Structure formats: C-alpha cells, structure tokens
C-alpha cells in the first residue's frame, strides 16, 4: 500500500467524505511533518466548479490548502448521478486510465495526498470500472466514513468486506454525524463494527449545526473541525 496518502470513501453518498477529507487535510497540513499536502477529487457530479456546494469548493475552503479549485477535481458533471452515467448524460465518458495516471502523478508531486471518492466503493465511473478500482490501482489505503446510527453496522461491514475482496487496506472507519455522544447505541455500533469488520473505528464526529450560519467563516469552521479531529479521532494509525 502507498503510505503517501489516503483514499476517503464511505458507505454511501452524502455521508461526510468531503467534510472529513477537508478536515483531515487541514489537520495533516498543520500538525504533521508533511509540507506538500494536497487534495484530489477525481470525479464529482451534481455540481459545477465555483458552486459553494461543490465538493471541490468545500474541499478547498474546508482545508485551507493552497490549491486552485479547478485543479482539485479532474472530472465535474452537473447531473447528480453516478459518475459513469453523469458523464454519459453529457455525451462524455470518464477515461479510467487518465484518472489512474493523474492520481499517480499527484502522488508523485505530493508529500501526502488525500483523495475523495464519490459515493461509496461500488460506484461506476466507467463501463467496467468503479471507485474501488481506482483506489486499488493507486494502492491507497482507505478511510471509510460511515453514518453513526442504526443501519451503519451492515453498510460498514459490507464496505469493509468488499474492500478486502479488492485487495484494499482499510485503515479505519470514522462514524460521522452522531447527535448524542452519550447514546449507548453509538458505542455498541463501534463495538459491532470492530468485532465483525475487524478494523478499528478511528473515532466519531458529531453533527455540527451549520444551518444557523450567516455565511461561512471558513477559518472558524476549519478550526472547529481540527479541534474535533484532535479530540475524537485516534490518528496515530493514519500517519
Ligand atoms: N458532521 C457533520 N455536521 C454537519 N453537517 C455535516 C456533517 N457531515 C456532513 N455534513 C453535511 O452533510 C452533507 C453531505 O456531506 P458531504 O458532502 O461531506 O458528503 P459526501 O460523502 O462527501 O457526499 P458525496 O458522495 O456527494 O461526495 C453536506 O451538506 C455536509 O456539509
Ligand atoms: C451525486 C452524488 N452527490 C455523488 N457525487 C455521486 C453518488 C453516486 C452514488 C451511486 C449509487 O451508489 O447509487
Ligand atoms: Mg463529497
């Protein structure tokens, strides 16, 4: 496995990969010896560059890294669909070999590269290629972001199991978005995932109330996430 980066995947779309990837990038940049930390989103869909909801936009501002938004994502498609079909709807296709070459080049040019997938692992990006195939070609270890509540044990263990069939190393699971840190079900979910998935749960992150924000103070948000990562995640397994 390549120890120069991490591939952030999840049990589903909308689970928090972008939030976690941006926060981890900010944390690694500020707290580790890695100088040239970069983020990469091979393919994003349902957005356009410059849209504040775009993964590339939120990765850039959420991490505070010195990158250009247009350089963070390689492919961007407007339809909120699986990348393969989002491209087809535009009369385009994703060239898997281009993504692999791009990923290897970015790994070469980074001290540490955090790559964010799209949706979960078995998400089609080309006729016979998925997000898992890309992670596998890049030999990047996975972080699996998972929901914190009921249903997550099955989804997470299925993702771990599939990662193993693809020869991928799962560095750990991050449960994201819990509402009540004292809920015994949270601790029980962690125990079941570690017991049946046989990978560490690196920690849990709370659901933050962004709704009441009047505009986003990205510096404050970055600091909030870094504090939470330092407090809640056991990162010594990561780097
Ligand atoms: N812990 C959290 N607290 C508050 N909001 C969160 C948290 N985690 C995720 N969100 C919000 O939930 C939504 C989905 O999160 P995010 O975009 O990170 O998912 P994703 O897994 O990257 O999705 P995709 O598969 O589209 O890349 C976003 O609006 C994000 O800001
Ligand atoms: C549009 C969304 N936000 C993601 N970019 C793509 C999610 C693809 C999920 C495919 C699937 O598992 O059904
Ligand atoms: Mg995302």
Image: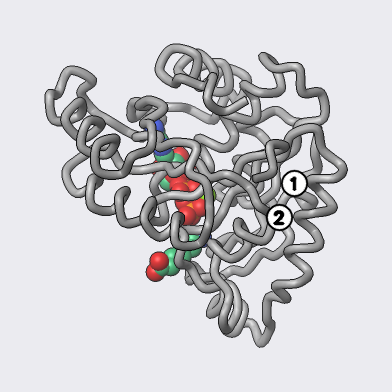
146 sits left or right of 111 in the view: left
- Residue beneath label 2, please? 73
Query: Which residue is found at the position 22% from the left and 31% from the top?
Result: 191
Q: Is residue 20 above or below residue 120?
A: above
Query: What residue lies at 70% left-to-right and 28% top-to-bottom?
Result: 64
Q: CA distance from mark 2 to mark 1?
A: 7 Å
Q: Quick check: marks 2 and 1 in contact, CB under 8 Å?
A: yes
Residue named by callout 1: 69
Q: Nearer the viewer, residue 124 or 62?
A: 124
SS for callout 1: helix
Residue at the (23%, 52%) spot, across then down: 154
Image location of residue 118, percent across then percent down: 53, 58
The answer to whether residue 43 is above or below residue 174 is below
**Numbered disc in front, either 2 or 1:** 2
Q: Is residue 145 left or right of residue 37?
A: left
Image coloring type:
one colour
């Amino acid at each position: 496995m390549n120890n120069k980066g991490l591939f952030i995947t999840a049990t589903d779309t909308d689970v928090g990969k972008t939030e976690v990837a941006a926060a981890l990038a900010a944390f690694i940049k500020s707290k580790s010896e890695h100088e040239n930390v970069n983020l990469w989103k091979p393919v994003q869909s349902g957005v356009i560059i410059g849209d504040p909801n775009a993964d590339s936009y939120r990765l850039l501002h959420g991490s505070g890294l010195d990158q250009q938004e247009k350089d963070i994502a390689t492919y961007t498609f407007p339809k909120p669909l699986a990348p393969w079909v989002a491209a087809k709807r535009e009369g385009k296709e994703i060239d898997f070999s281009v993504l692999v070459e791009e990923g290897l080049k970015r790994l070469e040019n980074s001290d540490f590269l955090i790559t964010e997938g799209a949706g979960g692992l078995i998400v089609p990006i080309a006729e016979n290629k998925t997000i898992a195939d890309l992670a596998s070609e890049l030999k990047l270890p996975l972080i699996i972001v998972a929901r914190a509540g009921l249903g997550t044990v099955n989804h997470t263990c299925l993702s771990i199991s599939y990662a193993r069939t693809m020869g991928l190393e799962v560095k750990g699971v991050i449960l994201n978005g819990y509402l009540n840190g004292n809920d015994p079900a949270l601790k029980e979910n962690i125990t079941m995932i570690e017991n049946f998935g046989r990978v560490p749960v690196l920690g849990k992150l709370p659901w933050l109330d962004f709704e009441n924000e009047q505009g986003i103070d990205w510096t404050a948000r970055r600091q909030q996430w870094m504090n939470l990562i330092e407090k809640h995640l056991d990162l010594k397994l990561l780097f």
